[in-house]
Amino acid sequence: MTTVSKSNTILYWISTGLIALLMIGSATLYIVKYDMVAENMKHLDYPTYLTSILPFTKISGAILLLFGSKFIPANIWKNLNEWVYSALFCNFVLAAIAHGQAGDGWINAGTIASIVILVSYYFSKKIGK
């Protein structure tokens, strides 16, 4: 039996919690400030209909990261977890690139979230999530 390091578990939950908080906060902004977010989508050269779709995907991703292993059978969760991390990472990288290309700077929320999701993924493997 392997022992999971307490520091690995703490780092996993901190990074995963930050990602979930970012996703839920972002989704809330998309809903509450729809027009502002739609204008920002235009600024980034993304279609504005994404403003209606992304809140659902962001909330789903946050819920799955936080609670997926509790409600989904382990054999299914193992593969689904990889897809969740992959989808969120792609979302963050595309956001970072879009903001960088739009002149908002290359160090932005997408860049930071890309790093944090990699930390969460790394520690999820370390603790066997």
Image (cartoon, rainbow, N blue to C red):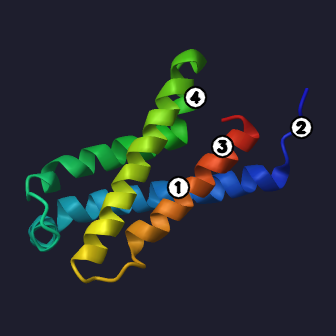
Judge left or right: residue 111 versus residue 91.
right
Tag 4 secondary structure: helix
Q: Residue at x 60, y 52 (%)?
A: 120
Tag 3 secondary structure: helix
Q: Nearer the viewer, mark 4 or mark 3?
A: 3
What residue is disc 3 on?
Answer: 124
Q: Could you tell me how far apart the alpha carbons at marks 1 and 2 are, in whole angstroms?
A: 24 Å
Rendered image: mark on residue 70? 4
N-term-proximal mark, 2 vs 3: 2
Tag 1 secondary structure: helix
What residue is disc 1 on?
Answer: 117
| Amino acid under disc 3 | Ser
Q: Could you tell me how far apart the alpha carbons at marks 2 and 3 are, in whole angstroms?
A: 14 Å
**Mark 4: few, some, or many residues within 10 Å (few <14, many ≥20)?**
few
124 and 70: which is toward the camera? 124
N-term-proximal mark, 1 vs 3: 1
Q: Could you tell me how far apart the alpha carbons at marks 4 and 3 are, in whole angstroms?
A: 14 Å
| Amino acid under disc 1 | Ile
In this view, 9 is above or below 30: above
N-term-proximal mark, 1 vs 2: 2
Rendered image: mark on residue 3? 2
In this view, 101 is above or below 24: below
Residue 18 visible in image: no
